[in-house]
Image (tube, rainbow, N blue to C red):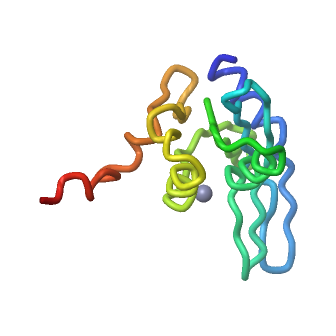
Amino acid sequence: MTNKELIKKAAALIKPKKMKDGLCADVGCALISEKGKLYLGVCAATGSNVICAERVAIGAMITNGEYKIKKIVGVWKNENGDVFVPPPCGNCRQFMREIDETNLENTEVVLDKDKSVKLKELLPYYDWWKKQG
Ligand SMILES: [Zn+2]
């Protein structure tokens, strides 16, 4: 699946819902697992709890017994419907790494329709312990 197609799938999930202290579903995530299956998620921020779209999609993948991500994208739309592709937050980067260390090398994080980077490129010094002694 191309970056553009994956971005389109994530964008289609976005249906913002405001609530008392939060906003849900204004970010969508689409990921392809190593086995080639598509998993989707939206964010949920309620004030006291925030869970990113990425971790919701990854949770669906884990629920299905998979831990290896081939390609992932998060998408946000502004009130004019313009589509943006923010990189995953630090929590999500670390989470992707911790569920399977091989994701560092094998997970392609989409940053644009024409640009992706490996997860490890978003986690500088991820191998710090190997540099000691
Ligand atoms: Zn996140």
Q: Position of residue 35 (x, y in %)?
A: 72, 26
Is 49 or 67 nearer to us in this picture? 67
Q: Position of residue 86 (x, y in %)?
A: 56, 45
- Please state the total of marks drawn on the protein image: 0
Residue 77 versus residue 52 in the image, above or below? above
- Which of the 4 image quarters holds residue 92? bottom right
Give the quarter of the figure containing the N terminus: top right
Is 47 or 109 nearer to us in this picture? 109
The residue at the point 49 percent across, 46 percent down is 101
**Given the current orientation, which residue lies at the most extreme bottom position?**
48
The residue at the point 54 percent across, 55 percent down is 98
The residue at the point 52 percent across, 20 percent down is 114
Q: Position of residue 116 (x, y in %)?
A: 49, 28
Residue 5 versus residue 16 in the image, above or below? above
Q: Position of residue 131 (x, y in %)?
A: 18, 53
* Residue 57 in the figure: left or right of residue 133: right
The residue at the point 72 percent across, 52 percent down is 53
State ligand 1's quadrant.
bottom right
Give the quarter of the figure containing the C terminus: bottom left
Is 76 or 93 nearer to us in this picture? 93
